[in-house]
Image (tube, grey):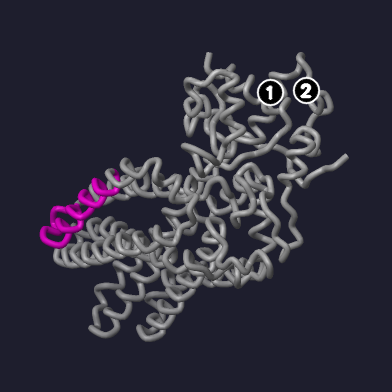
Amino acid sequence: MDIIGQFPLFYFPEYGSAWMMGMTGTIHILASHTSVGAAMLFAFLAYKAYKEDRSDLYPYMKRYGMFLLIFSYVIGSITGPGIWYTATAASPRGISALIHNFVWVWATEWVFFVYEVIGVFVLVYFMDKIDKKTHLKLTFSFALASVGTLALIIGIISFMMWPGTQAYYATGSASDAFFGTNTFPHMFLRIGFMIMLSGVIGMVISSAIKKDNAELSQELTRKMGYVSMLGGFLVLFFFMWYMGTLPDNAHAVFNVTKASVIQSRIILTVVFSIYFLVAIVKPRFISTPLAGLMIFVILIAGIWPGEKLRESMRKPYVAGQYIYSNQIISRDVPGKGIKSELPIIAEKGLLQVNPFIPENLRVITDENKLEAGKLLTRMSCSNCHSLEKTGVFRPLKDRLAGFDKEGIVAFLQVLGEGGRPYMPTLKLPEQEYDAIAEYIASLKY
């Protein structure tokens, strides 16, 4: 029997498998991006404090650092392994591809990360115990380690969207996978967002010291307004560059929701531009509850939709434009000794080549057709769609509204053509198409 290297299926009801990783990742991004942005902000404040002999800035930095320790390095350290757990369950072959391509890049990133963790403790707890010049050097090294962590991770994440160069498929080289048209626009886009986020969170700290020192509070709130405005401008500028470097399938997905995405981004830009201008012109109006609320707005209206969009635009792939979201290898990668699994699936069917199929479902009969169709649909579609009648994210039944069973079969056979060019055709034996269509048709009633 021909067997492909699949893993056991993980499916999270109502939401779908991949979206659990997205939800965990959204929280992690808020924490981790705060860390990198704050590291750059610390370098700016430490330089200013050293050059201008502004000792009054150090208590602010210490309070910010304590917030960073709890918010970024505790919450971030919890959700980071959470991403590994959910990603490994939902996309084991995707994670395997990243590890096999970037094991030494990841090892290097962990060196930077360990330095970050040690560095933030040193900066916070030894701020009053070391001289200002030493503190400045430590702050700059902390910022460099944070940006280094970002740069290494961005190359890996960008590979998930599109390998660095076409040569990667022939060479299998980590550098060919890492460096590409998408990598640096993506990195600068993230840096802009991190700078903006550091300013938004900085306003929480600066507004909290209003009772102790109103003048310093207003000065720092105004500075955070400028920092946030700069970061927001960089986000808008590099987002346009970033979008121009994406593959065709990403643009095809983006065009489906383009109008609503642009409208929501315009609204968000206007809201935060007003907020930043208020911080600059009337800093005393920025209160701690308002500043905290704006972080929540960024999380719900900014990061979550942004991550959903990025995850959607990567479809139908999960890594390297050669592993589909449903874990099937869709093309040859000679540099890695990888062969496409599409021909054998078209010939034998998914039920025959997956090692984890229950024996009673390997052959479709009238008695097990609905159950086999349910399993086939989960194997093929659940990484992008929720399957239940009450499914929350990209419910499959809504995508096929108005189709009867025969129409669903016809639709599945011509995927990749017509109205959904970003969805590839998955050639299957006729009896598997029939079983999938029968199950999907049952969802609509």
Q: Over which residues does the magenta segment extend? A: 264-286
Which class describes the residues within 10 Å of circle 2: few (<14), some (14-19), or many (20+)?
some
For disc 1, the marked residue is 435
Q: Amino acid at mark 2?
A: Ile
- Callout 1 touching callout 2 (CB < 8 Å): yes
Q: Quadrant of residue 100?
A: bottom right
Residue 353 percent across, percent down from the top left:
79, 39
Question: 183 left or right of 327?
Answer: left
User: Which residue appears at 45% of the width and 76% of the height?
Assistant: 144
User: Along the polypeptide, which appears first: circle 1 or circle 2?
Assistant: 2
Which of 148/375 is in front?
375
For disc 2, the marked residue is 364
Q: Residue furthest left?
A: 282
Which class describes the residues within 10 Å of circle 1: few (<14), some (14-19), or many (20+)?
many
**In the rendering, which numbered label is found on residue 119?**
none
Q: Can residue 115 be found in the magenta stretch?
A: no
